[in-house]
Amino acid sequence: NSSAGLGYIAAALSTGLATIGTGVAVGPSASSAIGAISEDPKTLGKALIFVGLGEGIAIYGLVISIMILGRL
């Protein structure tokens, strides 16, 4: 069935593109967070929040993929 195939492609793209976006977001923010923490250890909480916000993109992509696969 071609609609099922398109659904699988959509699920793969939603997870794949979300994780690519996460890599783009987390890479610079994590390296900056490590630098900030090394200068002032009190910034650990704020730095983890910013890195976690970037990682949330991948979680949303995975949730969308699960929702798409649930409809097939």
Image: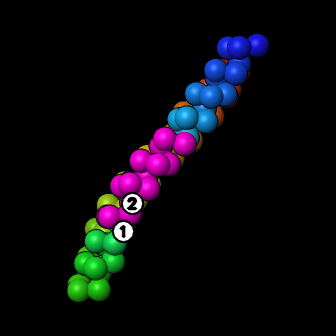
Q: Is residue 36 left or right of residue 48?
A: left
| Quadrant of the rendering where the C terminus is positioned | top right
Question: Are the residues tagged 1 and 2 within 8 Å (C-beta)?
Answer: yes
Residue at mark 1 to residue at mark 2: CA–CA distance: 6 Å
Name the residue that disc number 2 marks: 26
Vertical position of residue 29 compared to residue 53: above or below: below
Could you say where residue 52 lies in the image, as x and y percent from the top left? 40, 59
**Which quadrant would residue 50 be assigned to in this image?**
bottom left
Q: Disc 2 on helix, strand or loop? A: helix
The image's mark for residue 30 is 1
Q: Give the range drawn in magenta.
A: 16-29
> Which numbered tag is attached to residue 1?
none
Seen from the viewer's position, the closer of residues 44 and 21 is 21
Q: Is residue 29 left or right of residue 61?
A: left
Q: Is the magenta stretch mostly helix, strand or loop?
A: helix
Question: Is the residue marked by circle 2 packed among few (<14), some (14-19), or many (20+) residues within 10 Å?
Answer: many
The answer to whether 35 appears left or right of 11 in the picture is left
Q: Where is residue 22 in the image (x, y as percent from the top left)?
A: 43, 52
Identified at 25% across, 78% down, the residue is: 36
